[in-house]
Image: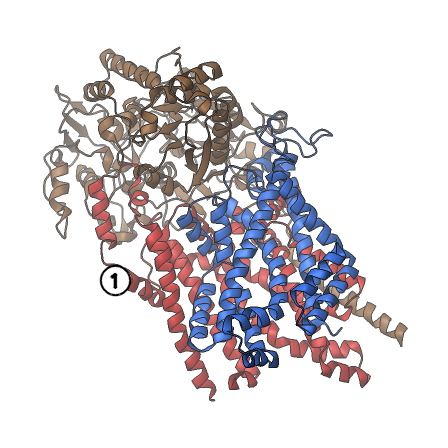
Amino acid sequence: MATNDGLKRIVLMKKMISVLLSIALVLGLSSCTKKEVSNDKVLNLAVSAKIKGMDPIYANDLYSSNEVARVYEGLLEYHYLKRPYTLVPNLAESMPKVSEDGLNYTFKLKQGVTFHDDKAFPDSKGRELTAEDFVYSIKRLADPKLQALGWWLLDGKIKGLNEWRDKYADQPKVDYTEEVEGLKAVDRYTLQFKLAKPFPQFLYSLAMPFTFAVAKEVVEQYGKEFINHPVGTGPFTLSEFKQTNKIEYTKNPSFRKKVFPSESSPEFKHMLTDAGKTLPLVDKIIVNILVESQPRWLNFQKGRIDYIGIPKDNFDSAVIPGKGITDDLKAKGINLTVTPSLDVTYTAFNHDNKLFSNEKLRQAMSAAFDPVSSNKLFYNGTALPAQSVVPPGIAGHIEGYKNPFFGQNIELAKKLLAEAGFPEGKGLPEITYDCPSSTISRQIGEFFKQQMSKIGVRIKVVQNPWPELQKKIKNRTVMLYGIAWGADYPDAENFLQLLYGPNKSPGANGSGYNNEEFNQLYKTAAVLQDSPQRTALYEKMNRIVAEKVPWIFGVHRQSYVLFHSWVKNYINADFNAGQAQYLNIDVAAKKEASKKL
Amino acid sequence: MNIWVYVLRRLLYVVPILLGVCLIIFVLFNVVAGDPTHLLLGKHATARQMAELRHELGLDRPWFYQYFDLVKSAFTFDFGRSWSTKQTISTMISEGALPSLTLTIPGFVITTILSVSLSLLVSFYRGSFFDKSSVIFCVGLMSISSLAYILFGQWFFAYYMDWFEISGYDSGFPNFIPYIQLPVLIWVILSIGPDLRFYRTVMLDEVYQDYVRTARSKGLNEKVILFKHVLKNAMIPIVTYVVIQIPFLILGALLIESFFGIPGLGGITLNAINSSDFPVIRAMTILSAVAYILFSVLTDVLYTVVDPRVRLK
Amino acid sequence: MENAQAVTTNINKPREEKSKSLWRHAFETIMKDKMAVVSILIFLSYSAIALLTTFDLVAGDWAKEVGGSYTAPSAEHWFGTDIFGRSVMAKTLKGTQVAMSIGLFTALISGFIGVLLGAIAGFYGGKVDEVIVWFYTTFSSIPSIMLLVAITFILGKGLLAVYLALGFTSWVSLCRLIRGEVMRHKDREYVHAATAIGGNDFRKLFKHILPNVLHIVIINFSLQFQVAIKSEVILSYLGLGVQGRPSWGTMIDDAKLELARGVWWQLAAATLAMFVIVLSLNILGDALRDALDPKLKGK
């Protein structure tokens, strides 16, 4: 009986195990097949954040504005192959005529440019773009009912536009037919802007996605769902935007004749092989949204993603092993490009907090901070220590300037701390340091804490979700916070405004720094066209903030991007709206290289 | 008591629960979330813009109106629009539910089949080395953090060994299958421990019942007892346990979806948490609470249908 | 040690003959189970490490740089170093303190709420019971991750917030069990007897009924303990976890950037440390249940 029972048990067990095994087989190892490389020219991209829809007026983050710029276009764009950044006409026929006083801008539009086909148009055929479309699109940006995120760009800049906005703020319906003095379509192809006061950065704003052209019919057809129905004039089309993790664009078949530039800065000469070719150069773009850095990095190494970089607005991203490029990567044909970004990282003091009106304390903390180690740990030693606020590459940066309170000097820091009234940190409360919630931000916070402990300043690191941090900054409940700023356009004004007193929070000046001398200089410089006089003012301001230490400066990052051998014409740019049309894929090379991955 | 009266009574009880859920959500999120304007208006917001927006979102109305709206949304499923993506939340949910289910249903079915059969097996060999070691093995599996499984699994099995897709998703059958294999595997590993322990207890409860002893004394062999009697009688707790887990399947898997790029509700929830997108967090909370409540009613009703004694109590 | 424990149980329940034999029996059963004994030893040594690190006797210098950034494990540093060149071993040890305190306080908080509400509901019945049942049914309908997020938003960041958030979200199952058990017990003879000699409600509940449901509390305690340790990882991942000191959660969270560059030791150390204690607590929980739950005692 016993043996019989035992035998049965074994048989039963065997049966069960075979059931379990077959389940495992069905689930698992059924697909070890590699994907075939497609014969089409497909660009595979990865972005690290959810896209917030495809409406230009809401595209205030880097990721959304890049997506918007694949479909929509503006009057101007940055020359793809020229540095320093140079504006060139895009939908405009030529650069505008500017009046003597710098207040009137007249644009001629390109003729024969059409919107993508969409059911909003008669016969679903995209109609021609006219000057009225820009009038409409820019009014949308000002529409008080729409709460556009790009309104700050033109707030107070165009004659009559603020009045128009205010007039309709309390009325049930906004009247777009009412004429605004500073924004007129003179004829079908002529557009005229009148500014309320000189605004030297005005042209840059016309290269930003906020002011890109949308069609009234489409906006009215889809209403609130317009955000999911991008219909522009650009090189690529997207039939419907969905909240998935994959966005697929196809080449716009009716794209106007636009060609690859035939002039370039010396460093991009090798890209001129594509000069004169019709844009866009690829047939399709697939954008993969991968929030986590590990899958992004692994997918890149497998060749499923063409290039991968560290987005300037986001600490939470892939870190590349080693300093340069490893032999392993080299063998796979992967290339590295390193370019300085127009940005600055910093730790801001909340100047509403009485403690930080003590200038010596601020200087002491700055002198205790070790930018070299920070650079090594978080930027692989490739970033440039930030002596002050304006990054290299734009007017206002002072070449070779050395901030006296920057660069670790523990002796000096201790001395300053004692002079501030807190010898060895005695009498100082614990100072909270707020940062975003990503892993790298936390590590940077821990590093800061470690640095400050060297002179006896106690720091407590607090992580916050991004909006929560913004809220705390605006409510003035922070003491110190670590953050970064990336340029909206290549002008030092965009950085200096962060410290201009009247811009105090809820404006862009989150630290609430207010220095009369600085404010006066800023006011003077803000209305000046680019000139040696303006540059001198910028430099003076730059020096003031370096010495007064309203922030502890960090680094100007260099963004480094890895790209596969089959990606052609890749340039890492701060303002890369519309870049995808210039990129090319070498399908034969991709097939070859994929074997090694 | 008539079964329909019972069902009706059970359904009526849903109302105070739902009101309570809405109250907790309202207190937690409307009080804490407070002001969405910074999130919505970005870094250049002015005070005036904020006031306009607050008015537009109805945040300047008395609290009971806002509470009423919340309750209403639990019935209409009209949750308004997301603060961060500006999409209609009901659309986000309906589009995200399917990808989540393609991950969770296979995971759930496989786990249930595996753990029920394994639990039968171990209760058959109760007390033996095999019993102990398989229980410890499964408990060991659940003693490792899910994040560790995901990080390691993705790096080792998908990247290094190249057995699975690293991440991504294609909608439509059978396109999604290659993408869910590894996520499903991780799901199974994570949930098999608790399930096996539960089912084993259920089976053992039955094994020690009098009728089993009687059957055994009548000379029936163990296999017959196990499959015919024990399994049949254990079906009630098994089915209850299965049904009550269903609402959680809709919610998807937070970390797994985020790491594997599956555009499901778990990823949406995680994104909402990271961006303080309170309407979405609120909507997901209400959705899962409603699902949970309805399914627990369903379980109770099923239970009474199967076992009429319960109703009499 | 063994004697001492047996004595305490005797002192605690001198009047309950039935319960005494249950506890003694349970104690003997557990002591016979080698796995359970090992688990107890592991639990005790983790507690010891946690205590020692609290007073900086062990790993007090975890914040010190001991080598280069990301050096691989060696004889000197068993688990290598992290991004700042700190010893991963020291961080793991220091992390024990966070993990054990989270386990302990969470289990205490959830135990307290669960027992209190469960006992009141079960004992008084009627309207009180209905309100409490309504409350916990409502509460349990909300996914705990959402509650965690909301609570950490309200309480801010830090260890206290983590204790409270995890404690507040994990008491329902215990509350249900206690309510049921108290209901079962309150009509027993010995409770009626207590009423006859003039015991008040409080006395009846705490002196007579609670000791009889204590085993449920203990089993639940060991399970809550390990669930809390695991939940800390998820909180850290969401950026809602412990701030400014090492925890296993933040170490695993770090690994999501490190693993792709081949730095596996931080993940390995934290996972291993967690694995051992969570597994032990699970085994201990099972052993306790087998020993204390009368339903399964028949075997």
Indicate the amino acid at tag 1: Tyr
Left or right of B101, for residue C50: right
The image shows residue B61 at horizontal and vertical percentages of 22, 57
Instruction: Determine the residue positioned at 48% across, 22% down.
Output: A455
B114, A130: nearer the viewer: B114
| Placement of the C terminus of chain A among the 4 image quadrants | top right
Label 1 Cα neighbours within 10 Å, binned few <14 / some 14-19 / many ≥20? few
Q: Does B81 appear above or below A192?
A: below
Q: Does C176 appear above or below A303?
A: below
Q: Is residue A374 visible?
A: yes
Left or right of C199, for residue C70: right
Q: Does C32 appear above or below A570?
A: below
| Placement of the N terminus of chain A among the 4 image quadrants | bottom right
Left or right of A4, for residue A402: left
The image shows residue A274 at horizontal and vertical percentages of 42, 26
Q: Is residue A263 visible?
A: no
Q: Would you name the residue on which mark 1 appears?
A: B65
Q: Pinpoint the chain carrying mark 1.
A: B
Left or right of C61, for residue B219: right
Secondary structure of the residue carrying tag 1 is: helix
C255, A290: nearer the viewer: C255
A37, B296: nearer the viewer: B296
Instruction: Determine the residue positioned at 30% across, 14% down.
Output: A539
The image shows residue A425 at horizontal and vertical percentages of 45, 24
Among the chains pictured, the one given blue colouring is: C
Q: How is the image coloured?
A: by chain
Task: Determine the colour of chain A.
Answer: brown
